[in-house]
């Protein structure tokens, strides 16, 4: 009999816990530029717009994010047919003890894909997507492809995609191991 495990998330602290034990979130493990509060708030607004576009819900948005919203609309129009399975889905791995929230899980042209929205392309996205794929609940996966959609102010999306294969999964696990070593040794303090 398989044991059920619980994930809790504290949005204010951006902390994930599996069965009460704090675990790192995917983006904490990956090296990335730290964003200002303004950029984080902007990203939150754009993610909300992405969910509305995906669900076909009409909405109004701040004119400051008109370019990224247009890029979202262009992405959805270009990638047809696309069927959204989930947005802002929390996933976790009991075995590897990490968690995260993927932006979108969708069937894109017959392939189950994990989609991540970015303000600009990132070299770490493929590892982020591999981590989410490994943590996807068995009833939803497997997702074999990942798509990064950069949503610039120009309104023209920049799309990159990867096959989420064993090599990427192993590289994600190597990054997770390195993170745990840095944490244990106090190198990031």
Image: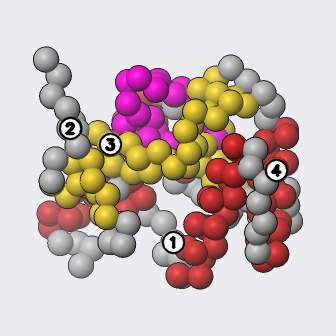
Going from the N terminus, do you reach mark 2 or mark 3 first? 2
Going from the N terminus, do you reach mark 2 or mark 1 first? 2
Give the CA separation, mark 3 to mark 1.
23 Å
Q: Which residue is labeled 3 in the image?
A: 92
Give the answer, above or below, for where 59 lies relative to 101. below
Q: Residue at x 82, y 75 (%)?
A: 63
Q: Residue at x 58, y 33 (%)?
A: 85
Going from the N terminus, do you reach mark 4 or mark 3 first? 4
The 10 Å Cα crowd at callout 4, few under 14, some 14 to 19, many 20 or more, is some
Give the magenta range. Answer: 128-147
Give the CA separation, mark 4 to mark 1.
27 Å
CB under 8 Å between discs 2 and 4: no
Give the CA separation, mark 2 to mark 3.
10 Å
Q: Is residue 18 magenta?
A: no
Question: Comparing marks 2 and 1, which lies closer to the viewer?
Answer: 2
- Left or right, 137 with respect to 57, comes to left
Q: Which mark is residue 73?
A: 4
Can residue 118 be spotted in the picture? no
């Amino acid at each position: 009999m398989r044991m059920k495990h619980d994930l809790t998330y504290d949005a204010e602290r951006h902390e994930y816990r599996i069965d009460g034990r704090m675990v790192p979130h995917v983006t904490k493990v990956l090296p990335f530029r730290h964003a200002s509060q303004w950029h984080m708030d902007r990203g939150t607004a754009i993610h909300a717009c992405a969910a509305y576009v995906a669900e076909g819900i009409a909405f109004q948005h701040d004119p400051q994010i008109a370019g990224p919203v247009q890029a979202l609309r262009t992405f959805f129009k270009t990638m047809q047919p696309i069927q959204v399975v989930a947005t802002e889905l929390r996933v976790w791995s009991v075995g590897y003890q990490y968690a995260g929230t993927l932006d979108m899980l969708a069937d894109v042209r017959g392939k189950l894909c994990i989609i991540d929205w970015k303000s600009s392309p990132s070299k770490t996205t493929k590892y982020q997507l591999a981590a989410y794929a490994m943590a996807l609940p068995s009833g939803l996966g497997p997702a074999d492809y990942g798509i990064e959609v950069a949503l610039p102010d120009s309104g023209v999306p920049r799309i990159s995609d990867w096959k989420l294969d064993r090599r990427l999964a192993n590289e994600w696990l190597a990054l997770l191991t390195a993170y745990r070593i840095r944490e244990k040794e106090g190198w990031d303090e």
